[in-house]
Image (cartoon, rainbow, N blue to C red):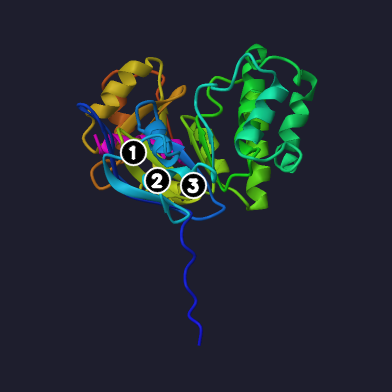
Amino acid sequence: MSVQRDKAPAVSCKGIVKIFGHITALRGIDLEISEGMLLGIIGPDGAGKTTFIRILATLLNPTEGNATIFGKDVKRDYRALRHLIGYMPGRFSLYQDLTVRENLEFFATVYNTTIEQNYYLIEDIYKMLLPFENRRAGKLSGGMKQKLALSCALIHKPRLLLLDEPTTGVDPVSRREFWEVLSQLQSQGEITMIVSTPYMDEAVRCDKVALMKDGCLLSLDTPSGLVSHMDRALWSATAEDMGDLLLKLRRLNGVLSSFAFGETHHFTFNEQVISPEDIHARLLAQGVRGLDIRKIPPSIEDYFLMISQETQ
């Protein structure tokens, strides 16, 4: 009788620590990613996203811990892994004096392939670049540079695609087009993708989301799973003086978390200690004007901000 075994993860990280001098950039990252998954790594600047992706790209060695990609060790098997990985760094790093076509041909040649062989992977992106095929890469707009960099990262048909903040600094239309391309790649199920971003609204497009802050992995789950971790109701509050409102909210006994969120403040509280009516009455008694409090559905960003406050 045959025994059914679970498929090995595409990426497995255990206890990844990275230290630069006196700075600890990563603090014991444990993470497994299934093959074909689109993982979003979400967090602010300084969270450790870029350092983590560079370790997976075999550009940095971890100080402690180990990571494997398709069963190969990132330190020992880095040469073999580089043929399996497509990497798009946060900064545009292609050859600015080469044309769009020349950059793509160069990367295809490096990986011993041709543009024609894997053109189906980049066709939807490259069609947007065709009018600029003979333009030097350094003369492209931000959105077009992004599309060219993704094309070069895909041309050798990698099994793992690593994208470090690919939509930072580009216009909203280019952001949307970029994620449409990733969704098409995801639907094919041939490439495992890891995308880092500071934009919480991009998290809902991922299969799973890893929330990072200060080098720590705070939470890992599906987008809906993260929101379900909110174990208490979320409320919003507005007033004439929003700065004063936030200070007074944070001083109320029973309020567990409170943070600015766009044009409102979001907060949670212990219902065993204080009620919404009590909060409203106490804030009015403290001179808050134009106060409006209402219950709202939470988002991934709310969950991230809440656990960020709790882990300080």
Pointer 2 with pointer 1, Cβ within 8 A: yes
Residue 115 circle label: none
Crowdedness near tag 2: few (<14), some (14–19) or many (≥20) residues, C-alpha within 10 Å:
many
For mark 2, what is the residue?
74
Quarter of the figure with residue 160:
top right
Q: Earlier in the sequence, mark 2 or mark 1?
A: 1
Q: Earlier in the sequence, mark 3 or mark 1?
A: 1
Q: Position of residue 281 (x, y in %)?
A: 30, 30
Q: Is residue 4 above or below residue 236?
A: below
Q: Earlier in the sequence, mark 3 or mark 2?
A: 2
Q: CA distance from mark 2 to mark 1?
A: 8 Å
Left or right of residue 107, residue 52 in this image: left
Q: Position of residue 153 (x, y in %)?
A: 60, 35
Instruction: Name the one closer to the observer, 267 or 175.
Output: 175
Q: Residue at x 43, y 37 (%)?
A: 53
Q: CA distance from mark 3 to mark 2?
A: 9 Å
Camera-near label (3 vs 2) is 3
Which residue range is magenta in the image? 295-312
For mark 1, what is the residue?
61
**Three-letter code for the amino acid on which mark 1 is drawn:** Asn
Left or right of residue 163, residue 268 in this image: left
SS type, badge 2: loop
Farthest residue toward the right?
131
Instruction: Name the one closer to the observer, 272 or 186.
Output: 186
For mark 3, what is the residue?
80
Q: Position of residue 250 (x, y in %)?
A: 26, 28
Q: Position of residue 10 (x, y in %)?
A: 48, 54
**Three-letter code for the amino acid on which mark 2 is drawn:** Val
Q: CA distance from mark 3 to mark 1?
A: 16 Å
Instruction: Name the one closer to the observer, 146 or 44.
Output: 146
